[in-house]
Image (cartoon, grey):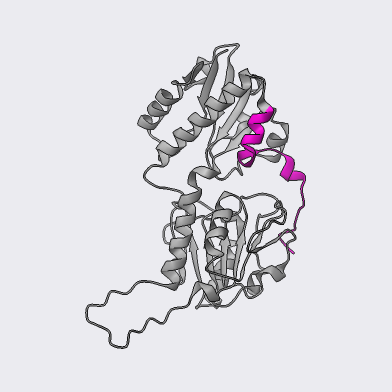
């Protein structure tokens, strides 16, 4: 049986050389051909879709979706995949969260250490040996989300900070050295001095930080968002920063991207980057390697009629409609 891989869109950091390399590598898999237009589709072939955040799945022809057996979305965010589409998809949807997880964690930790412990450069010996920094040990940390990124962050920070907690409505309590909260309450934000966003954007997380609860945070809170801009009411965050000059925010994502020239420049305690937390030198190679592994394993299981095993093996990467019906919170509460 022939499988045709069709990439719907490329990202700005994926040029023609990337697509040529992707085609070359994926066609090393037996029975796989890589097509760049739907006009190249050969009737009778099974389709493997590769999408990104620019893909509107509702614009993919129905005849193609009927022949689709696998969809790979090698991005971390999937808010362009509607609830309706996720529920109706008759094929596994693989999300690429593991690809960028370490990079996003390192970006986040880098911001944190830069804020709390910037390294001075002493041109002359400082006899007083002063280093008036705060320790992460003494902070109250709340991480929003316990997926690939949240888990690494929590396990990395737990030895440094005894007052660490995680909010995630879809994760059961585990034997881990920090607390996990499933029910949302503004009280979770009370006196938090480091707030880290590691959540995907969905019904439970949209505008989770808003006018009704943002003032529960410590007036010296460090806010880190390398996840999704719409997790916050951005205007309220700006007001919070202006009202609390000892607070600080590192934002890599925004409600509107790209942000307008000069946006937020009047806020001295705000650091902005251009959605780069997940970027690194080997990213494009790692994306292709991820796709190669998934496709090769999927085809083998497909031909062996053992897709249930495939779904079990990649359970943490599979996106379906199950979480849509799980416990909900109201972001306005």
Quarter-of-image position of residue 71: top right
Q: Is residue 256 visible?
A: yes
Along the horizontal axis of the image, is 275 left or right of 86? left
Along the horizontal axis of the image, is 147 left or right of 121? right
Residue under the point 61% across and 23% down: 301
Q: Is 203 or 4 nearer to us in this picture?
A: 4
Quadrant into which the N terminus falls:
top right
Along the horizontal axis of the image, is 249 left or right of 127? right
Quarter-of-image position of residue 186: bottom right
Q: Is residue 149 above or below residue 26?
A: below
Residue under the point 66% across and 68% down: 211
Q: Is 119 or 36 nearer to us in this picture?
A: 119
| Image coordinates for residue 196, horizontal then vertical, percent | 56, 62
Q: Which residues are magenta?
A: 308-333
In this view, the residue farthest toward the bottom is 128
Q: Is residue 131 above or below residue 172?
A: below
Q: Is residue 228 visible?
A: no
């Amino acid at each position: 049986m022939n499988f045709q891989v069709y990439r719907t869109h490329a990202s700005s950091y994926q040029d023609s050389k990337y697509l040529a390399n992707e085609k070359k590598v994926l066609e090393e898999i037996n029975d796989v051909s890589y097509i760049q237009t739907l006009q190249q589709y050969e009737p009778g072939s099974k389709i493997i879709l590769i999408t990104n955040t620019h893909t509107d799945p509702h614009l993919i022809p129905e005849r193609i979706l009927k022949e689709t057996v696998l969809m790979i979305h090698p991005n971390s965010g999937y808010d362009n995949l509607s609830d309706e589409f996720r529920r109706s998809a008759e094929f596994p949807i693989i999300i690429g969260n593991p690809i960028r997880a370490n990079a996003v964690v390192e970006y986040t930790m880098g911001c944190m250490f830069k804020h709390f412990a910037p390294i001075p450069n002493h041109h002359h010996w400082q006899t007083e040996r002063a280093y008036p920094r705060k320790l992460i040990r003494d902070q109250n940390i709340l991480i929003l989300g316990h997926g690939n990124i949240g888990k690494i962050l929590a396990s990395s920070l737990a030895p440094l900070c005894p007052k660490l907690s995680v909010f995630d409505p879809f994760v059961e309590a585990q034997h881990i050295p920090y607390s996990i909260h499933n029910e949302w309450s503004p009280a979770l934000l009370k006196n938090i001095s480091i707030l880290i966003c590691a959540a995907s954007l969905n019904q439970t997380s949209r505008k989770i930080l808003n006018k009704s609860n943002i003032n529960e945070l410590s007036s010296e809170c460090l806010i880190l968002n390398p996840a999704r801009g719409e997790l916050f009411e951005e205007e309220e965050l700006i007001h919070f920063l202006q009202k609390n000059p000892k607070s600080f925010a590192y934002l890599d994502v925004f409600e509107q991207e790209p942000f307008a020239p000069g946006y937020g420049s009047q806020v001295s305690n705000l650091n902005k980057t251009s959605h780069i937390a997940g970027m690194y030198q080997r990213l494009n190679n790692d994306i292709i390697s991820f796709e190669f592994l998934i496709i090769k394993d999927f085809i083998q299981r497909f031909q062996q009629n053992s897709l249930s095993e495939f779904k079990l093996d990649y359970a943490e990467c599979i996106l379906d409609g199950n979480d849509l019906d799980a416990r909900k919170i109201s972001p306005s509460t």
